[in-house]
């Protein structure tokens, strides 16, 4: 708790501020001439890490005098904040970049910038230089704080500017942030990952694990609560190793307990827990802290010990099932969700049977199931026992059917139960329907008006569907 924000961070923020002021002046001249502010459009792919980086980019851009627009074709600055966790995420970015060729021809003064995880891979930057020459600026995940300088340089150059750092520096706190104010918010508690699961690109794109100071996190949560936020999700690639980089023994369980004390906050969630690291203290905290929701996202990836070993997950099926038993004993109403990878190199029919067997034993409440995607630069990409695409898809369907049956059966048991819902907003399809989540992270829809948005209400489940629950508010 004693650690203070270091001087280099403050230094960077000050230098940034000067450049931000310069660009703001240029944009004001533009505003006077054209009678409108310059506009930016940003598309964010991937996880909450990228979402949060986009919030920082937006914060800096608003200080520079830009307005945000959702119309790419009307923008003076187009940004893609990219993800490369699976191939389809990358393909979307390449497709969209291709579409921007004609936009750049029509708007030669507009700036096109690409950043985020994809840019941390050399082969991607090479491809952009070769095929997408209309891009003006390429930067990575480690130098986002230098964005004002990079933008200013890109505006004054006819060539593509590429600046990607190989490794992370210190955590830069204090960058301006524009958040979409909502009932719920995500707060990063750590960055990076040290685990090197053999399929995963994240450790290469996000660098080594670094934890943010608890003081900085707690003050961010308090500010959000003062702005009306009711639910906070604490984020990290492996939240259970939060604090490992400190020398004072402060742990994730300590942080959970401290956040639980914040007045006005209603709910706390966290993501993601690695099964090798989740501690008894964290499970106890879920049982004891009233604001901490009874939902654990505990990605298993596979139910087969052979696969877990090949994936370098560092736990066994038996250890995982022990954890589940412990959670269910200490927090009897806990819901459990997972991530699964189907078709990892070398996977046999027996391995899939082991996964199905584990799914049936745990009886998950939700699962994010992915077909294995080869990621250049990861160890598993080099394995020569890759699984045929057709086989991967067949296995994927089989696993999905098992999971869907379980979820739909569990949902049915909720008929007539009265559950506490945090109302998040109106349904996008029908404004007379409100939508929110239970503490266990199930989505519930019910008729109501907007005065209930942001409130905790009691809803009786009348029609449990396979993937969402319909209900009625009870007074
Ligand atoms: N740090 C988190 C999540 C990381 S990425 C964790 O360890 O759980 C989110 C999920 O994407 C992973 O849990 C995994 O299921 C999936 N994933 C990662 N790399 C993948 C790949 N190459 N192919 C398919 N799915 C992948
Ligand atoms: Fe990827 Fe594994 Fe790290 Fe999660 S824990 S980000 S799956 S390497
Ligand atoms: Fe997130 Fe995708 Fe990067 S999942 S950490 S944005 S590779």
Image: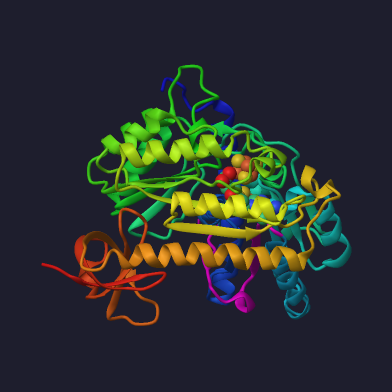
Q: Using the rendered view, name the quadrant where residue 329 is placed.
A: top left
Image height of 402 relative to 100, above or below: above
Q: For this rendering, which residue is in front, 237 or 65? A: 237
Q: Which residues are magenta?
A: 62-86
The residue closer to the viewer here, 407 or 123, is 407
Most extreme residue toward the top is 248
- Measured as percent of width and height from the top left, residue 253 is found at 39, 30
Q: Is residue 273 visible?
A: yes
Q: Position of residue 475 (x, y in %)?
A: 10, 67
Q: Quadrant of residue 66?
A: bottom right
Q: Is residue 438 left or right of residue 108?
A: left
What percent of the width, then of the height, locates residue 149?
67, 48
Residue at the extreme right: 130
**Position of 368 compared to 372: left or right?**
left
**Residue 44 relative to residue 330: left or right:** right
Q: Quadrant of residue 373?
A: bottom right
Q: Is residue 338 magenta?
A: no
Identified at 33% across, 46% down, the residue is 294
Relative vertical location of residue 408 with respect to residue 116 in this rendering, above or below: below
Q: How many marks?
A: 0
Along the viewing direction, whichever of 426 and 387 lies nearer the viewer: 387
User: Where's the N terminus, which quadrant?
Assistant: top left
Indicate whether 138 appears above or below 88: above
384 to 30, vertically: above or below: above
Which is more toward the observer, 20 or 320? 320
């Amino acid at each position: 708790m004693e650690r203070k924000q270091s001087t280099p961070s403050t230094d960077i923020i000050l230098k940034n501020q000067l450049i931000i002021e310069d660009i703001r002046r240029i944009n004001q001249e533009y505003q006077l001439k054209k009678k409108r502010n310059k506009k930016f459009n940003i598309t964010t792919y991937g996880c909450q890490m990228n979402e949060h980086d986009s919030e920082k980019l937006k914060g800096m851009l608003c200080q520079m005098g830009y307005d945000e627009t959702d119309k790419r074709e009307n923008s003076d600055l187009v940004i893609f904040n990219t993800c490369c966790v699976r191939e389809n995420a990358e393909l979307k970015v390449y497709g969209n970049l291709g579409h921007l060729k004609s936009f750049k021809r029509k708007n030669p003064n507009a700036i096109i910038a690409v950043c985020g995880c994809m840019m941390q891979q050399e082969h991607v930057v090479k491809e952009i230089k070769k095929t997408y020459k209309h891009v003006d600026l390429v930067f990575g995940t480690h130098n986002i704080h230098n964005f004002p300088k990079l933008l200013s340089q890109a505006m004054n150059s006819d060539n593509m500017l590429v600046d990607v750092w190989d490794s992370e520096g210190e955590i830069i706190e204090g960058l301006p942030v524009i958040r979409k104010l909502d009932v719920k918010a995500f707060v990063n508690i750590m960055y990076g990952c040290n685990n090197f699961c053999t399929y995963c690109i994240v450790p290469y794109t996000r660098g080594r694990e670094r934890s943010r100071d608890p003081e900085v996190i707690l003050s961010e949560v308090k500010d959000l609560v003062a702005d009306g936020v009711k639910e906070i999700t604490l984020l990290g690639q492996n939240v259970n190793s939060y604090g490992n980089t400190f020398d004072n023994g402060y742990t994730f369980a300590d942080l959970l307990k401290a956040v639980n004390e914040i007045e006005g906050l209603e709910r706390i969630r966290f993501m993601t827990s690695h099964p090798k690291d989740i501690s008894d203290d964290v499970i106890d905290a879920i049982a004891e802290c009233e604001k901490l929701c009874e939902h654990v996202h505990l990605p298993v990836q596979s139910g087969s010990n052979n696969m877990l070993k090949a994936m370098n997950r560092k736990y066994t099926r038996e250890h995982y099932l022990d954890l589940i038993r412990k959670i269910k004993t200490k927090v009897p109403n806990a819901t459990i969700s997972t991530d699964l990878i189907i078709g990892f190199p070398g996977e046999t029919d027996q391995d899939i049977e082991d996964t199905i067997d584990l799914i049936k034993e745990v009886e998950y409440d939700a699962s994010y199931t992915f077909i294995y995607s080869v990621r250049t630069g990861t160890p598993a990409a080099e394995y020569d026992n890759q699984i045929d695409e057709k086989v991967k898809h067949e296995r994927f369907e089989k696993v999905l059917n098992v999971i869907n049956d379980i979820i739909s059966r569990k949902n049915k048991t909720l008929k007539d139960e009265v559950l506490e819902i945090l109302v998040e907003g109106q349904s996008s399809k029908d404004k007379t329907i409100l939508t929110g989540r239970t503490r266990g992270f199930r989505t519930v829809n019910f008729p109501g008006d907007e005065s209930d948005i942001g409130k905790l209400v009691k809803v009786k489940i009348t029609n449990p569907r396979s993937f969402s629950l319909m209900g009625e508010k009870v007074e």
